[in-house]
Image (spheres, rainbow, N blue to C red):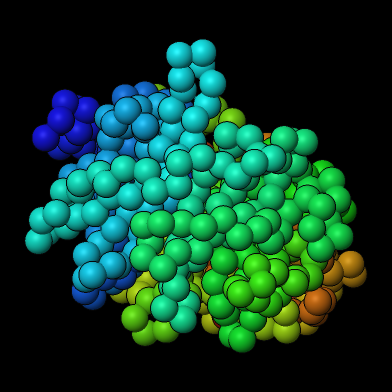
Amino acid sequence: MNSLLNQANTILNQATNSPDDHWRPKFHITPPEGLLNDPNGFIQFDGQYHLFFQWHPFACQHGSKFWAHCTSQDLVHWQLKPTALAPDASYDKNGVYSGSAFVLNDELHLFYTGNLKDESNQRVSTQCLAKAVDGELESYQKLGPVIHSQPQGYTAHFRDPKIWQHDDRWYCVLGAQTEQLTGQVLLYTSEDAQQWQYMAPIAGDGINGLTDFGYMFECPDLFPLDGQDVLIGCPQGIKPQGMNFHNRHNNGYFVGELDCTRAQYNHGAFQPLDRGFEFYAPQTTLADDGRRLLSAWLGIPDEDDQPTVEHNWIHALSLVRSLHLIDGKVHQRPVEEHQSLRQSQQQWPEQPLNATQPLTFSSENCFELVLNVEQIEGVFSLRLAEVDEHYVDISFDSSTGIFKLDRSHALHQTGSRECTLNNTDSLALHIFFDRSVLEIFINNGEEVFSGRVFPSQPVSNTTVTSTKSCIIKELIRYDY
């Protein structure tokens, strides 16, 4: 085993959680130490789920990335394994960047971007393979680059291969930047996953009528979903559009139809996937039971100012979600396996709520909340992580249909995000609050807001109010 892998595994094996760290999530994946970002290589193989992630073990800042590796039997309980890949080859010494996983000849393979800075500090990007070489799938041998350079007309910002097989051929999409500094998604094909042929750009700036679509398209993922082909990814540099795309770097998806033979992808408008503050680099896999599953980084590039660095770690991955295409819109739902984490529960009876009659409870900052509200008049509000004058406000205005997540009163984070819901007189919320992670699923996954919140205490209040009136039909808190 080489020295860089040794160093990373030493950190992995010796890392301990600080007893006064009440921000480290209990049921989300976090790095043992250092910085976590993109999920990579999400796959189910021989009945076991594998999820890798970008990891810089030596500091809470971006550096030469490794691939950390964790496994699960149920998508909920994850076990960290020995580090899979280190930036130790001549073609990836500045980072083993993001990619995907696939099975070839009954062997688990990894497909990733090798990041290299040459003698003149110019970026060189190659797409590389590695494969598992032990029965436990804990040791990986690098096989070297299989796509040696970007196509003509593109810069070396060329990365994040996502691979799949269709009609006995392999395909992959890659994020790219043109020499005019615009972002596109490129399609490649191969008979054997070794020799690759560039086909064409299929999405991004200048394609299908898109203009002003940013300067780079990262982490593309193209897959069939309920009869359509969905392309998710992260265009960098797109401008806000109404309530959409207000993060420094954004996420979203197209719904369309891919013609592999002609290398054409006809699609509709780009829509937000997660409307919260911290959500990036989503990656999916197809489970053996037919579900399309997603994991994402609950962070944003260039935003690493979080108080967890006091405890020598930063960032987390999302809960695993299942995807569903309903009336042309991607719905996301937490996988049902998360119900196995439920411990004690508190259930409130159906009751009316008005401006003078709030509902409040106190609990540790680690729970799942199921809330169904009907006959909403005025503004319905749910305050979370309430400690003294600090809190996060979740609100829904029945007169406008606007749902808002507001952190302007939070201790460390700020800003607000919002969207318009179709239904204006009822609201179904499914909320996961995991110490410093907040994931809010609205109306059975019609919209999702994810973000981080850092309450000053491990116990906080939750307050439900209405400016006029509503009926609380269901309110259940499951402690984790």
Where's the C terminus, which quadrant? Answer: bottom left
Residue 288 position, x and y percent, is 34, 81
| x 45%, y 14%: residue | 119
Q: Nearer the viewer, residue 199 or 350?
A: 199
Q: Position of residue 457 (x, y in %)?
A: 44, 38
Q: Residue at x 51, y 16 (%)?
A: 121
Pick the front one: 216 or 89: 89
- Comparing 58 with 63, the one in front is 63
> Is residue 380 positioned above or below 364 on the image?
below
At x 79%, y 79%, the residue is 423
373 left or right of 26 in image = right
Residue 307, given in percent of the width and then of the height, sits at 47, 29
Q: In this rendering, does residue 100 appear at all?
A: no
Q: In this rendering, is residue 439 above or below 340?
A: above
Q: Is residue 394 left or right of residue 90?
A: right
Residue 414, image quadrant: top right
Quarter of the image that includes the N terminus? top left
